[in-house]
């Protein structure tokens, strides 16, 4: 056992071995990066963009109590080809005994429901944003017309919620309807969609280089103390 220890010490205390270890630490990030690139293991992420349909500024009004059977519909042009979320401004008049459920749907011009959410009316907060996220990126066609449709189930008068709209028509590409009757302006609405897939391969390689080169410097300071003293 003692002889093996001496043998290992001779190997790892050898200057050529030290240089080889140091060189390996320096070039290892590049080798790993080349392997990842060849294997297609680069890290990528989706960039999201937010687009306002109805601004929060301007003359704000509520669309009235959304009771059983009431349908509120806002049209908009898809700003990207993948839909991710919608944000609305809701209100409850400060009531704590509201009841019912709001079914919110993303639909196309043919009436096909591309995605649907359910909002518990009792859980809504007064004058607060509600963001509805999709579990996946919904495929849409950029530049085509779509609808965000809100229909109430089970809310009687005096126990229903509402959403805010802006009376100024700052979004001419869309219209707001309540039970088929066009209203002024548009809902306070913003939608979020994927704009591009961005690669983080370069960041991954840079991080590896930083870690490996810090380790290489620590190893150099410990493995070549005499050379460092002479260089001073």
Image: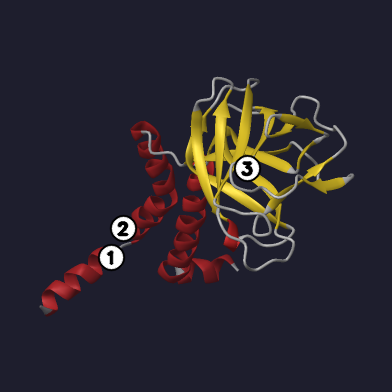
Name the residue: 45% across, 62% down: 215
Q: Name the residue nearer the viewer: 48 or 155.
A: 155
Q: Name the residue nearer the viewer: 226 or 186.
A: 186
Q: Nearer the viewer, mark 3 or mark 2?
A: 3
The image quadrant where one finds the N terminus is: bottom left
Q: According to the image, label 3 marks what residue?
A: 86
User: Looking at the image, do the residues carrying marks 1 and 2 touch, with CB atoms under 8 Å apart?
Assistant: yes
Coordinates of residue 72 in the picture (x, y in percent) = 66, 38
Name the residue: 38% across, 42% down: 31
Q: According to the image, label 1 marks what residue?
A: 12
Can residue 116 be spotted in the picture? yes
**Which quarter of the picture shows residue 178?**
top right
View extreme (bottom): residue: 2
Q: According to the image, label 2 marks what residue?
A: 17
- Alpha carbon distance from label 1 to label 2: 6 Å
- Alpha carbon distance from label 3 to label 2: 60 Å
Q: Earlier in the sequence, mark 1 or mark 3?
A: 1
Callout 3: 10 Å neighbours few (<14), some, many (20+)? many
Can residue 49 be spotted in the picture? no
Where 172 falls versus 55 (above or below)? above
Coordinates of residue 176 in the picture (x, y in percent) = 74, 33
Name the residue: 52% across, 67% down: 228
């Amino acid at each position: 056992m003692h002889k093996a220890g001496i043998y290992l010490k001779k190997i790892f205390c050898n200057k050529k071995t030290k240089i080889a270890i140091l060189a390996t630490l320096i070039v290892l990030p590049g080798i790993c990066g080349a392997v990842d690139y060849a294997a297609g293991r680069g890290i990528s992420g989706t960039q999201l963009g937010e687009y306002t349909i109805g601004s929060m500024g301007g003359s704000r009004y509520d669309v009235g109590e959304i009771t059983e059977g009431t349908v509120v519909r806002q049209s908009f042009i898809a700003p990207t080809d993948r839909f991710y979320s919608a944000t609305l401004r809701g209100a409850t008049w400060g009531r704590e005994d509201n009841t019912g459920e709001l079914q919110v749907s993303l639909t196309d011009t043919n009436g096909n429901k591309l995605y649907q959410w359910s909002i518990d009316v009792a859980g809504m907060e007064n004058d607060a944003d509600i963001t509805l996220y999709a579990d996946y990126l919904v495929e849409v066609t950029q530049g085509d017309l779509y609808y965000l449709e809100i229909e109430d189930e089970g809310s009687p008068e005096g126990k229903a919620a509402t959403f805010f709209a802006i009376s100024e028509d700052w979004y001419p590409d869309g219209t707001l309807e309540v039970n088929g009757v066009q209203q002024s302006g548009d809902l306070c609405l913003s939608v979020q969609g994927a704009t591009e897939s961005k690669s983080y391969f370069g960041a991954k390689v840079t991080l590896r280089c930083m870690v490996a080169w810090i380790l290489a410097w620590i190893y150099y300071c410990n493995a070549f103390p005499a050379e460092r003293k002479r260089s001073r």
